[in-house]
Structures are given as C-alpha cells and as structure tokens.
Amino acid sequence: MKVFFDVDGVLIDSWHAAPDRRKPWDSTIEQDLGVHREAFKKSFFRSPTDSYESLMHGCTIGALDLKEALASILPAAGYDGSVDAFIAYWFEKDSNVNRSVMDVVDRLARHPDIDLYLATNQEHYRASYLWDELDLRRHFIDIFYSAKLGHSKATPAFFEQVNAELGVSPTENPLFFDDKSEMVRVAHNAGWDACVFETVQDLTGHPRLKNLLRL
C-alpha cells in the first residue's frame, strides 16, 4: 500500500489549515532579525505579481528561485543580513516536528507492505532541507513536491503526475493525509483515498492502517 503524507500541518506542527492551531515560524522575526513582520508577509506571501499569486507561489511551483525572490523584498522589510542567514533562520524555526505523528510514520515505515511518500507544496531549498537536514529520507521512499513537479498540489496535474511516475493503477487508491480539505478533494478526484488530518488518531484509527499498526 502506498501512503502519502503532507508536510506542513501534518508532519510539521507549525502552519495549519485551521488558524487557531497555527504556530508561526516568524512570530519573533522582528526581535531576532529586525524584519518588519507584516511588511515581509505582505510582500512575499500576499501580494500578487503579473504571473503569480505571490512571490512564494512562484517559488513553490518552481518558477522563481527563493533566494532571488527574498533578495528582492527583504531590504524594504528592514533586513540587512544575508539571504542565506535568513533562510537558515526560517527553515530552523519552521521545523517543529510532530513527534506523535512521526512515531506512527516510523512504525509504518517498518511494515513490509507499506511504501511511504511525501506529497507537499515546497520550493526547492526547503524540500532539500526537509529531506536531508531533517532526515525525512530515513522514513520515506521519495518526496513529491510542487516545485519539482511544476504544479501546485491544489491542481489535478500534481496528483496525475505522481500517479504516472509511480505507475499507480486506477484501483490502487493510495492513502493520503493532508490538513487542507481542498487538497483532499483534488486528491480524491485523482483516485486517492484522501483524508483530512487533524490529530494522530486520524492515522491510528484509519480502517486501512489500524490493524497494520497492531503488528
């Protein structure tokens, strides 16, 4: 059985689809780096360009380089350090691993009938950080991410490309956990058994997993 996990809001306990559960990585960015938090968020995450919903959107579909995009807006937000230092701060702060979820992942990874994958919206640098520095490669066979595929996870093309690359059959129904209901709907349409993730009980109590986790 192929089982896919989203990263942020599932494996990483920081950004969640539910606003009241979010643990922002940038909550002390003004004190730590001198960056005006709202100015940074508006210019990088919220303001549309001629081609993209935001600079971050351009990065997450692989059309823009994160370092170049950040370099274009950070000085106006009050930052005078290096882009590499800013990214290191960001990635470290945004790496609050959900240990209870990872405990379940670890158990699933040891099961001979389960293949684990990541399916996530990421730009290239953070995808590499998650895979290598956080060592998610120890648990998962591969990471399918938006910048590598060239498609947002909110689009059918993302899941269609994963299906094609893995040779997923129409009756296979890969299992997928994501905290965003809109992603779950898109995955359903691609033939995946997709579930909205809220707590670790969504994993341990899932009818396709609970008996396997008892072994």
Image: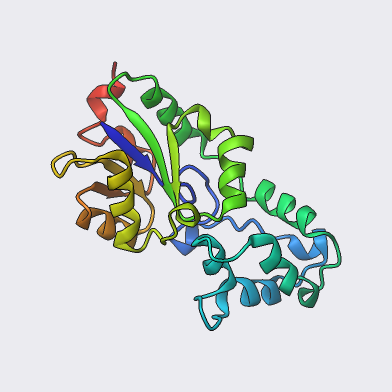
Residue furthest toward the bottom? Answer: 50
Residue furthest toward the top? Answer: 215
Q: Is residue 96 visible in this depiction of the protein?
A: no
Q: Nearer the viewer, residue 180 or 139?
A: 139
Whole-percent x and y of residue 29?
Answer: 74, 62
Whole-percent x and y of residue 50?
Answer: 53, 83
Whole-percent x and y of residue 188?
Answer: 22, 54
**Residue 211: quadrant of the picture:** top left
Q: Quadrant of the C terminus?
A: top left
Please, which colouring scheme is shown?
A: rainbow
Whole-percent x and y of residue 147?
Answer: 50, 56
Please report the residue visible at 61 percent of the width from the left and 58 percent of the height from the top: 24
**Residue 129: quadrant of the picture:** top right
Q: Is residue 80 visible in this depiction of the protein?
A: yes
Q: Taking 22 as reference, is 114 left or right?
A: left
Please report the residue visible at 25 percent of the width from the left and 28 percent of the height from the top: 210
Q: Taking 4 as reference, is 145 left or right?
A: right
Q: Is residue 102 above or below residue 152?
A: above
Q: Nearer the viewer, residue 18 or 140?
A: 140
